[in-house]
Image (spheres, rainbow, N blue to C red):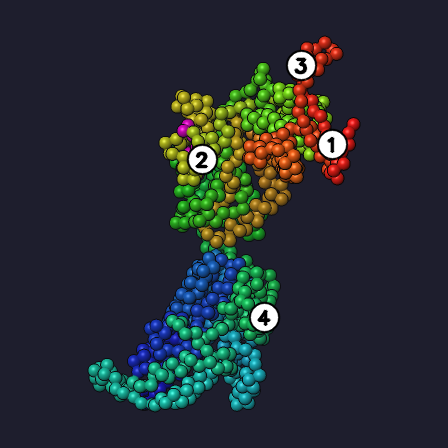
Amino acid sequence: METETVAIIGPQCSTVAHVLSHVANELQVPLLSFGATDPTLSSLQFPFFVRTTLSDLYQMAAVAAIIDYYDWKAVNVIFMDDDYGRNGIAALDDKLAERRLKISYKARIQPDVEIGGGDIMNILVKLALMESRVIVVHVNPTLGLKIFSVAKYLGMLGNGYVWIATDMLSSMLDSNSHLPSDIMDALQGVLVLRQHTPDTDRKRAFFSRWNKLTGGSPGLNSYGLYAYDSVLLFAHAMDAFFDQGGTVSFSKDSNLASVGNGNLHLEAMRIFDGGQLLLKNILDINIVGLTGPLKFILGTDRSRVLPSYDVINVIGTGFRRIGYWSNYTGLSIIQPETLYKRPPNSSSASQQLYSVIWPGETLSKPRGWVFPNNGKQLQIGVPIRVSYREFVAQVKGTETFKGFCIDVFQAAVNLLPYAVPYRFVPYGDGRRNPSYTGLVNLITTGVLDGVVGDIAIVTNRTRIVDFTQPYVSSGLVVVAPFRKLNSGAWAFLRPFTPSMWLITGCFFLVVGVVVWILEHRINDEFRGPPKQQIITILWFSFSTLFFAHRESTVSCLGRAVLIIWLFVVLIINSSYTASLTSILTVQQLSSHIKGIQSLIDSDEPLGYQVGSFAEHYLHEELNISKSRLVALGSPEAYAKALKDGPEKGGVAAVVDERPYVESFLSKQCTFRIVGQEFTKSGWGFAFPRDSPLAVDLSTAILQLTENGDLQRIHEKWLMHSTCSLDAGELESDRLHLKSFGGLFLLCGIACFIALFIYFMQIVCHFRRADSNESVSAGQSNSLSGRIQRLLSLMDEKKDPSTHGSKRRKTEKSAFDDDSDKGESGRNTRGKKMELTNEDGINSSN
C-alpha cells in the first residue's frame, strides 16, 4: 500500500477483509472482495468495500429454506468462532426464526488452535446425545473434512442423520475432482450448497482454456469465477474512469501523518484522489460475466443482483444437483435463469427438490430428531384434581396417575415408532383444582416438557405452547334447574310462541282482506252491506284453517293468493298438530334460563369450576362482572348451589365444559343443559412450541380414533349415566316464528304482487274512462271528484262475462222490494245497466 494503489482485489477470507476495509476507507481505495462472504461487511460501515461474490445472508436463507422444506424444526450447527463463522450462523439464526425454526445447539471451534481428532470427537459426541439430528457445518474446507471423517467413525453418517454443508465443501469438491475414497465415503448423503453460475457457452469456453492451462488440476470452483469477474469489473470501471477525465493522483493523509514513524511506515501511504469516482463507476457497472449479470443493488446492502445457489447431494465418487435456490422463487428444480422470465412465486406449494439419497443410503426422509440419549426423562406435568377424578386422579401415596386422560396419553405413546422416556410430575396442592393456565406456563419456562390432562385448547394457551390433536370435543354449556310442565287447560296454546300466534292471526286477516279486494267487483258472494262484508272477510279467512270456506273465488289473482295461503295453512296445521301431540303425550321440562344470552342480560350469580378457563371467558369475553361469578369446587357444590338458587345464596346456573357437565348430569337428574354450546374447543396434550412430539402424538390420537380404542377408553371411564342428557327436552316442542318465516314471506309477497296487479288494472281502466264520463256527466274535474269516481269504479259490480271490448256505466236508483218470504220491506239499491258498444252502437233489452 506504500505504492500508488487505486484498488484492492481480495482478500479471500472475511476476517482479513474486516481489517483491510478500514485501510480502504482511510485511503479511499475501492476493495473488491470475491471471497469475503461475512454478511456484516456492510457499505454503511465500510463505504469502499464492494462484495463481488454472494453474501452469506443469502446462503443462510437457502439453508433455512431447505430445513423448512423437509419440515425439520430445530438444527445443531458447527462453526468457526471467527467473523466468518459467527456472523454467518447469526444470519442463519435470523432466517430460521422467520420460519419459526430454531438452532438447538451451537458448537464453536477456535480458528487459531490446531484442533485434533479428539477435540472434534468430543464435540460430535455431545451432538449425538442431543435431540436434533440435523447438523449444519459452516467451517473452512480443511476442518470440514476432519469433521466428516470423525463423524463417519462415530457412525453419525448413518440412518436418521442429516448433514448440510455450506459452500466451503462444494468449492473443495470442484477444485479436487479425484478425492481419496475414504474422504468421499465420509461425505455420502451430505447436502451441499454451491454458488450458482449460469451454464453458458462463454463459461464452457473459459473452462476449456483453464483446463488446457493447468491440465485440469486444480479445478476451477465458483470463487475462481468470481475472482475473474472481479478483475473484469475493475477493468471496465477504470475504462469509464479515464473516459470521464479521471486522473490517478494521490495526496497525503493527515491522520496517518500524525501517527508518526514506525515499523508499518503508515506515513508513506497516500489517499487516492479519484477513489470516489472510481467507486461510483464500479457500482454503476452493468455487464454480463462468467458468474452472471455484474450489477449491484444500490443501497445499504450493495449486493449482487439475482443471488442463487445450487443444491447438490454427494453420491458415490461425485455429486448430483437436486435443485436450485434463489431469492426470486425459493427452491426449484428449474434453473433460475428460466424462472426470472416468469412472475415471482415463492409460495410453499411451489417449492420443489429432486429426491435425495440420505446418509445410510436411504431415500426415506429422516425424521430429523430423536429423544436425547442422555438418560433424561421428559418431565410431564399432570394436575392433581379434587373433583371429576374419573378424568385425572393421582393414586394415593404414589406419583402415578390414572383416569381417562392418562389412558389416552399412554395409549397414544404406545403407538409411536420410538420409545418415549417420561415421568409424571404432580401439580397442585390436592385441596382444590389447580390453575391450568399456570400449569401450561411452566412449559414456557422450561420447568416441564409437556402437560397431560384435561387441558382445554384455548386461544391464550395456543400462543405459548403447541397442542396435540384434540382427543375430546369440548365447549362451554349452561346447566340450570328445571321444572316439569303439566298439560293443563291451556295446553293447546303451548305449541306456538306468542309471536307465532300473533303473526299467524294477522296473516289470516290480511289474506281475507286481500281476497275480498280481489273478488269484490266480480263475485256476488263478496258483496253486500258493509256489515255483511266484514263478516264475510272474517268467516272466509278463518274458515281456511279447516279448508271449510264455502265462498268460491272467481278472479285469477284471488285464486293464486288462496292457493299459496292454503299451502301455508297446511304446513302450520300439520306442525301444530304434531307439537300438540308431543306436549300432551311426552313429559315437558321448563327453565326460566334459555341459554347464555339470558344469563348475560340478567344480574343473577353464575357458578364456574375452580381452575377452569370459564372464569376468564365469562369476564373477559362476555363482560360479565366478577361479582356475579361464584367459584365451585366439586359436583356436590354444583348441586347445592343450583338447588339453593340466588334467593338462598346459590347460583342461577353453572357454566362449565361439556365433558364435566355430562359427568355431573349422569348423577344429578334434577338439572339439564339449557341452550346451545356457545364455544367450540377440545382437550389436548400441551408441549413446547414446534415440538415434533406434539405432531407424532396427534397422528397417534387419530389412529386411536380410527381403530376404536379411544371410544373403548371413553366407555371404560365415562359411560355410567343414569339420567337422560337430552337438552332438547327443555321446551323443544314449541314452534317459533323463525321456523315459518319463509312461508309467511312467500305469502306476503304473493299478496303484494296480486294487489299491485289489481290496482294497476283499476288505474288503467279509470284513466280510459275518466275523460268520457266526466264530460258526458258534466262532473267536476277536481281532485275530490276524481277520487270519488275512482272509489265508485272500485265498488261497482262488474259482469264476469264482460271482456275488454265492453265497458259499463252505472246509475243508482232506490226502490222498495217486498219479499215473498214475509220479510219486512227494505230499501235496496238497484242498478240499471246500459251497455254501450265501443263503436258507438247501442243495444237495448
Which secondary structure lies at badge 4?
A: loop
Q: Determine the CA span between mark 4 and mark 1.
A: 92 Å
In this figure, which residue is indicated by the disc labeled 4? 334
In reply to whether residue 564 is colored magenta, the answer given is no
Alpha carbons under labels 3 and 2: distance apart: 92 Å
Which residue position is annotated with label 3? Answer: 826
The structure residue drawn at horizontal position 34% and vertical position 87%, both measured from the top left corner, is: 5
Residue type at numbered disc 3? Arg
Which badge, 2 or 1, is on the more N-terminal residue?
2
Q: Of all residues shown, which one is farthest toward the top?
A: 822
Residue stretch rendered in magenta on the structure? 603-614
For label 2, the residue is 385
Residue 570, placed above or below residue 53: above
Give how far apart the Cα atoms at labels 1 and 3 are.
Answer: 28 Å
Q: Number of labelled discs?
A: 4
Question: Looking at numbered disc 4 in the image, what kind of residue is underneath it?
Answer: Ile
Q: Quadrant of the N terminus?
A: bottom left
First along the sequence among labels 1 and 3: 3
Residues under numbered marks 4 and 3 in contact, where contact means CB atoms less than 8 Å apart: no
Determine whether 691 is above or below 533 in the image. Answer: below
